[in-house]
C-alpha cells in the first residue's frame, strides 16, 4: 500500500466523519434524537469536552488544561503513527495492518478537528450556525466534540454499582454516545488485536 492510497482512504474517512458531525450540529438541538430503529438505534446529538465515548476529563475551573493535554496527545499520536506507517511501508507490512492504523489516525484527526476548530467556527446555539466575528463559543483547541450514535439496547434498572459505568442516566445498557471517529478507532483496535496480533509480536 502506498502513500497515495493511504491519503485517499484517510481523506474519505475524515470527510465522512466531519460531514455527519456538521449535519448533526447544524440540524438538531442538544439531546434531540432521530430514532433510526425503535428501542435500538438513535442519532442523538450530544457534545463532550473529553475523550472517546463521551468520557469527561476533570476540570477544576479556569483554563481546561486536561482538554489541552488530550488535544496535544492526539496531535503527537497522529504524528508518530504517520511516521510508523512510513516505516511499515518500507518493511512491506501487511495491508491490513496499515489500514487498521489509518483508521486510528482518521479517528484521532476527526476529533482533533472538533476540538481545534468547532469552537471558532460555530455559535453555541443549537442548531448551531456559522459564527460571525466574535460569536464563536470557545478558543482554539477548546471546542467540544460532537457525538451522535446511541444504542439503548435494554433498560437495566437493577444494575450493580460496580457495573454502573455500563448504563446511562436513563438506565439503558451501553449508554455511551459516540461518533464515527470513535468507531474508526474502536473497530481498528479490535481488528488489529484479533487478526493482526501475530504481526505485532
Image (cartoon, rainbow, N blue to C red):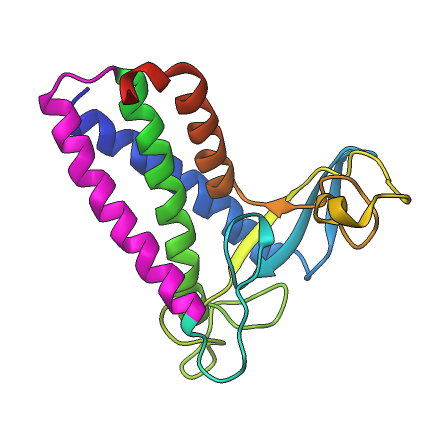
- Name the residue: 72% across, 43% down: 166
- Name the residue: 42% across, 62% down: 115
Direction right: furthest residue = 158
What's the magenta region?
66-94
The quarter of the picture where residue 36 lies is: top right
Q: Is residue 57 above or below residue 79?
A: below
- Name the residue: 14% across, 16% down: 92
Residue 72 coordinates in the image, percent (x, y)? 31, 61
Nearer-the-camera pick, 48 or 167:
167
Residue 14 coordinates in the image, percent (x, y)? 38, 41
Question: Residue 28: in sight, yes or no?
Answer: yes
Q: In which quarter of the image is the C terminus?
A: top left
Q: Is 167 displayed left or right of 123 in the figure? A: right
The quarter of the picture where residue 95 lies is: top left
Residue 138 coordinates in the image, percent (x, y)? 45, 75
Direction left: furthest residue = 90
Q: Is 157 displayed left or right of 31 in the figure? A: right
Q: Is residue 119 above or below residue 178?
A: below
The quarter of the picture where residue 133 lies is: bottom left
Q: Is 8 displayed left or right of 35 in the figure? A: left
Question: Residue 167: in sight, yes or no?
Answer: no
Q: Is 157 displayed left or right of 12 in the figure? A: right
Number of numbered markers = 0
Amino acid at each position: 500500500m502506498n502513500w497515495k492510497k493511504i491519503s485517499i482512504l484517510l481523506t474519505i474517512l475524515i470527510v465522512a466523519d466531519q460531514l455527519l458531525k456538521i449535519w448533526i450540529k447544524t440540524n438538531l438541538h442538544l439531546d434531540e434524537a432521530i430514532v433510526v430503529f425503535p428501542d435500538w438505534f438513535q442519532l442523538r446529538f450530544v457534545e463532550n469536552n473529553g475523550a472517546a465515548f463521551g468520557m469527561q476529563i476533570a476540570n477544576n475551573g479556569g483554563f481546561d488544561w486536561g482538554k489541552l493535554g488530550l488535544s496535544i496527545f492526539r496531535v503527537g499520536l497522529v504524528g508518530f503513527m504517520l511516521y510508523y506507517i512510513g516505516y511499515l511501508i518500507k518493511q512491506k507490512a501487511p495491508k491490513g495492518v496499515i489500514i487498521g492504523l489509518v483508521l486510528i489516525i482518521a479517528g484521532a484527526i476527526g476529533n482533533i478537528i472538533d476540538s481545534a476548530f468547532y469552537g471558532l467556527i460555530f455559535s453555541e446555539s443549537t442548531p448551531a450556525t456559522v459564527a460571525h466575528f466574535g460569536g464563536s463559543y470557545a478558543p482554539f483547541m477548546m471546542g467540544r466534540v460532537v457525538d451522535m450514535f446511541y444504542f439503548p439496547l435494554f433498560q437495566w434498572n437493577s444494575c450493580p454499582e460496580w457495573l454502573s459505568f455500563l448504563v446511562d442516566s436513563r438506565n439503558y445498557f451501553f449508554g455511551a454516545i459516540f461518533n464515527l471517529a470513535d468507531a474508526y478507532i474502536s473497530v481498528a483496535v479490535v481488528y488489529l488485536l484479533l487478526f493482526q496480533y501475530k504481526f505485532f509480536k
